[in-house]
Image (cartoon, coloured by chain):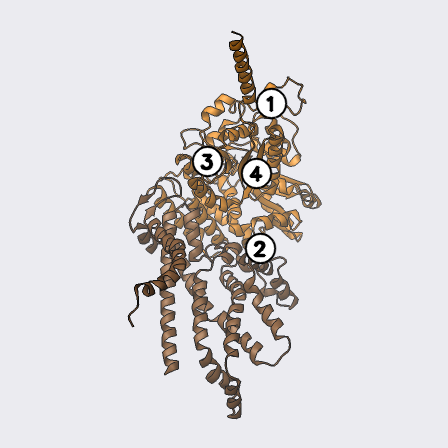
Chain colours: A brown, B orange
Amino acid sequence: MPKTKSQSFKPFLFIAPALFFYLAFFIWPYIQLIWLSLLEWNGFGDRVFIGFENYVDLLDDRQFWLSFQHNLSWSMAAIIIPVALGLFLALLLSRTPMHGKVFFRAVYFMPQVISSISVAVVWGWVYNPTFGLLNQSLEFLGLGFLARGWLGDQTFALPALFVAWSWIHYGFTMVIFIAALEGIDEVYFEVAKIDGAGWWQQLRYIVIPFIRGPMTTIVLVTAISSFQVFDLIFALTNGGPGRATIVLPLYMLTSAFTFHKIGYGAAIAVVLSMVILVFSLVLLRVRGSLKESSVA
Amino acid sequence: MRRKFVIGMILFSLSLLVLSGCSTPEATAEPTEAPPEAPIEESGGLSDEPVTLTFWWEGAAVGNLEVFQKSFDRFMEMHPNVTIETVAIPFEDMLRTFPLALDAGTGPDISMSLPLESTTYPAAQAGHLLELTAIGEERGWWDKYDMKAIEFDNRALDGIYGVPYEWTAVGVFYNTEVFSDLGLEPPDTLEEFEAIMETIKQAGITPVSVGGKDGWPLVHVWQQLVFTNVEYDTLRALEDRDPTQSYENEGLIEAANKVVEWFEAGYLDPNLLSTGFTDANDLFINGGTAMNIGGTWVQQDFRNAPFEVRFFPVPPMRTDIPLHLGGFNPANDIVIVKESPNVDWAIELMDFLLSEENMTLWWENGFLVPYTFDEIPPGKDQLQADLYTTMQANGPGHFITVAAPETNQLIWANMQEIVAQTKSPEEAFAEVQELYISEVSP
């Protein structure tokens, strides 16, 4: 039966409010951002149209490439470490008989709900070179030679920040994995046990295939948020020492609002969003192919 | 006739009422004897309507803000219809927020502004700041104010837009108890200063705390050496963005090498790259180090130390050039935002801040005001006396790392890398020079 005019119009009516907010608060500001990236403007007074000059300058900007490199290495680590940690804890808290599972789930998830700035304050204390928990613990364990000013060390500052960031994010991955694991029928494990499958084989042949879908979602979300990492770094090191922890969002902010190069900062923002988009498309593609292979 | 007379009387009475309503209560009140120390001034022609003035304060030194608050309290006492709301904003946030707020028309009425190209110049050139030259002349602001400070901060502008509230200097704040216990005296030469640091280190105390994690405090240590190792004119030209000058200057590099030498020798806090400005100050106040190389803007906080803190300038690296105390420089400017709906009251507040009464209040609270008193009032303490004496022996210096934000930040980051020894001073300053040239002669 052919649809009437009002029927074909109805779906648009339902999505209209969401579409309006999407256009008003995402698409329109994004168009403005692109426009800003084509201007030279110091935040005061006149704006001069300079075409793609800001983008050309980016190609030759060492700070930009260094920030990009830091973001990339951060993302590579982010799609492995918090995901693996979350999976490990999820297995522990769902497949291991123990008391207090709910309590531990809540405790491990807690960092996810704390504001990043509070987390930064806590980790600032942990890493404090004088009274910090980490150095004190190392001293207590007789490993004082390892103690250092973690956030002031060119080599360790970025990994130290990554540890703090992972501490926030593993809770999220853990919860998703727990939900996925609890969806697996216990029968599969019983049968596997009867067939003599050990812990590793159960993981390899039952758990991994079942959680493949959620896992790609987690990897995607984690990768995107890893490219957006800002607040923790801003609060703990502000990109230092030197430029050891500078990342694209921080460089964008500094360029736009500290160096008063608003157009240049906007260009960094546009490039960053494109990088995230490409990264997401690649991961979605991988996810799609994984789904196809699991169906096959 | 009688009717006309009545109407005339009514109109006359009404006009009297209107006129009396226009004038301030102070203006119409019988002259009374004001208390000698706290005269209440007239607010000539200003409305008695409630007004809220927003003042943006830049800085991390809470002690200074407390002194400002005393001034505001006094002003509000003089003008009960005025409320001053102070918003404290850290240095880097100020760089970010102030331009955007001015451009959006949501800025403060009166504010601190970072001098030169950081904020005052572009804000004034974009027409956001009120020119104060004529207003100041009319009100006598410039009669007793040290014009060197004002000219210094407004030198690239066509008039006066910002008024620095005090002179600032960077040098060595020291713990008198440690010095006394170890039999040490403030040094005259760099060799003596290094010997002092060595003695303190041998006594098991870290000699100097520096908040190197924040970048700029570490740069101040380097600048102290630069100021006495490079000719004044060269530094002024660099600060004025002269394209014929170069950051690949031997004197700048030698000073950076000296900082590394001190760090390697254990004279500077070994954790300085992971210690921020506030933590480094606290480390000194809590006795964790014997000295702190910092600016006069922290003197209020250092007065909270459980021991007496005093000050001496960093001795010169080179004695063959005239001594010009590093960073002896006007502080942040006070500016009035032109678009402010309360611009008249902002001028009135500025009038009070620059008055003899307020200058005395600031002086008595330890500020190093650029003001010529007929008779210098009693100062706050020996620390202020040290600072004042040091300043008297010198002309204004130059903070070469406040001239332009991007160059500043690169120098800050590079100094951290120099101390961490991941970059040599030569490489670091070649990079700074590359940026400098791209900025000053694009």
Residue A210 image point, x, y percent: 46, 80
Q: Nearer the viewer, mark 1 or mark 4?
A: 1
Looking at the image, tell me whether mark 1 or mark 4 is earlier in sequence order: 1
The residue wearing badge 3 is B232
Where, by quadrant of the figure, is residue A269 drawn?
bottom left
Looking at the image, tell me whether mark 3 or mark 1 is earlier in sequence order: 1
Dots 3 and 1 on the same chain: yes
Q: Which amino acid, by three-letter code, is at mark 4?
A: Glu
Toward the viewer: A199 or B21?
B21
Dots 2 and 1 on the same chain: yes
Q: Which amino acid, by three-letter code, is at mark 2?
A: Pro
Discs 2, 4 touching: Cβ within 8 Å: no
The residue wearing badge 1 is B25
Mark 1 neighbour class, 10 Å CA radius: few under 14, some 14 to 19, many 20 or more: few
Q: CA distance from mark 2 to mark 1?
A: 62 Å
Q: CA distance from mark 2 to mark 4?
A: 41 Å
One can see residue A65 in this view: no
Q: Nearer the viewer, mark 2 or mark 4?
A: 4
Q: CA distance from mark 1 to mark 4?
A: 24 Å
Dots 2 and 4 on the same chain: yes
The residue wearing badge 4 is B85
Name above or below for residue A146 compared with residue B31. Answer: below
Discs 3, 1 touching: Cβ within 8 Å: no
